[in-house]
Amino acid sequence: MAAYAFKRLLGAVPTLFILLTLAFVMMRLAPGGPFDADRELPPQVRANLEAKYHLDDPLAVQYGRYLWDVAHFDFGPSFQYRDVTVNQLIAAGFPVSATLGAASLAFALALGIPLGMTAALRQNKTADYAAMTVAMLGISIPNFVLAPLMILAFAVYNDWLPAGGLGGWQNFVMPVLALGTAMMAYVARLTRAATIEVMRSNHVRTARAKGLSKARVICVHALPGALTPVVSFLGPAAAGIVTGSVVIETIFGIPGLGQFFVQGALNRDYTLVMGVVLFYGILIVLFNLLVDLLYGWLDPRVTY
């Protein structure tokens, strides 16, 4: 398994290289620059700033220098947040984004799996229709629509929860619900479909024929098989829930990595945007690798 993980990580290097190159090219092609502001800078000040950040060098030189720094895990200085490096911004923002993403993922799994199994075990009954209606609503309402509606309902009209900012656990309630609802709905639908299929399989029928209790049949024999498609969904979904927090963090004013990314893109902060993009790319690689390794634990037939 260790050799398989090492090969996967080694194979991700070209992907990350292409991702970084595309981010570099797209940022340079975007109109405007990091020192374009409402008030025009004096020419000498602009020249000094560009010289400080090596923006007056040819693009090939800038690209080569940036690659060299990234190879040494140095994403460079931020152009907009003075005297702060991109590494420091990622270190400050990622714990907030990770907390929000982990809580949303836990909410989605804690509610989605029981909802899907309930629907499957009561197929074509009232509980099934009710569960799938909830799932369909969760998929149909985008988080950028759900979030403002929740702010109106729970913060503006009723003053039950803070509308935004970073404070206690109350500040995370609405962001977690807004970010995790769609994922909960997908998990519920996947769990339902997989559970129906597993409950009709031979090994579950054999377990029933042995006279095992219903709870043991479901938890020991059906659940691992039912979770396999959910696990395969979790890799890109977990990465997507972190990147999806860009919108949620902006709406709720949460100082996470997503908000740094948005501000960096608006301010043409080249190094910040490229650093966050590469960091997200690394996360996606790691999440997908973790999911592939989980297959072996859930299904002993999987070998590496």
Image (cartoon, grey):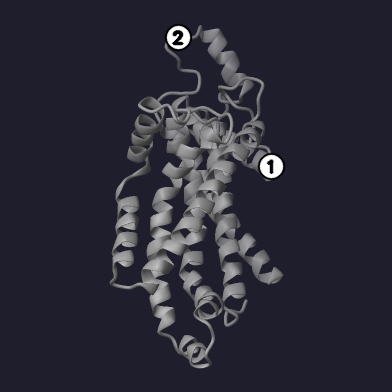
- For label 2, the SS is loop
- Quarter of the rendering occupied by the C terminus: bottom right
Counting from the top left corner in percent of width and height, residue 24 is at 51, 39
Q: Residues within 10 Å of mark 2 (few under 14, many from 20)?
A: few
**Residue visible at 42% across and 73% down?**
194
Residue that badge 1 annotates: 73
Would you say residue 283 is visible in this rendering?
yes
Left or right, residue 184 beside residue 293: left
- Quarter of the rendering occupied by the N terminus: bottom right
**Residue visible at 41% across and 28% down?**
155
Counting from the top left corner in percent of width and height, residue 267 is at 47, 24
Task: Give the CA separation, mark 1 to mark 2.
Answer: 34 Å
Q: Nearer the viewer, residue 196 or 289?
A: 196
The circle drawn on residue 60 is none
Give the amino acid at mark 2: Glu
Left or right, residue 94 beside residue 151: right
Which residue sits furthest top?
42
Counting from the top left corner in percent of width and height, residue 36 is at 46, 17
**Callout 1 touching callout 2 (CB < 8 Å):** no
- In the image, which is nearer the foreground, mark 1 or mark 2? 1
Residue 50 sits above or below residue 199 on the image: above
Q: Nearer the viewer, residue 68 or 91?
A: 91
Give the amino acid at mark 1: Phe
Question: Could you say which quadrant of the image residue 216 lies in?
Answer: bottom right
Q: Nearer the viewer, residue 161 or 97?
A: 161
Residue that badge 2 annotates: 40
Say whether disc 1 or disc 2 marks the residue closer to the N-terminus.
2
- For label 1, the SS is loop
**Residue visible at 61% across and 79% down?**
303
Counting from the top left corner in percent of width and height, residue 260 is at 53, 31
Q: Residues within 10 Å of mark 1 (few under 14, many from 20)?
A: few
**Residue visible at 68% across and 37% down?**
74
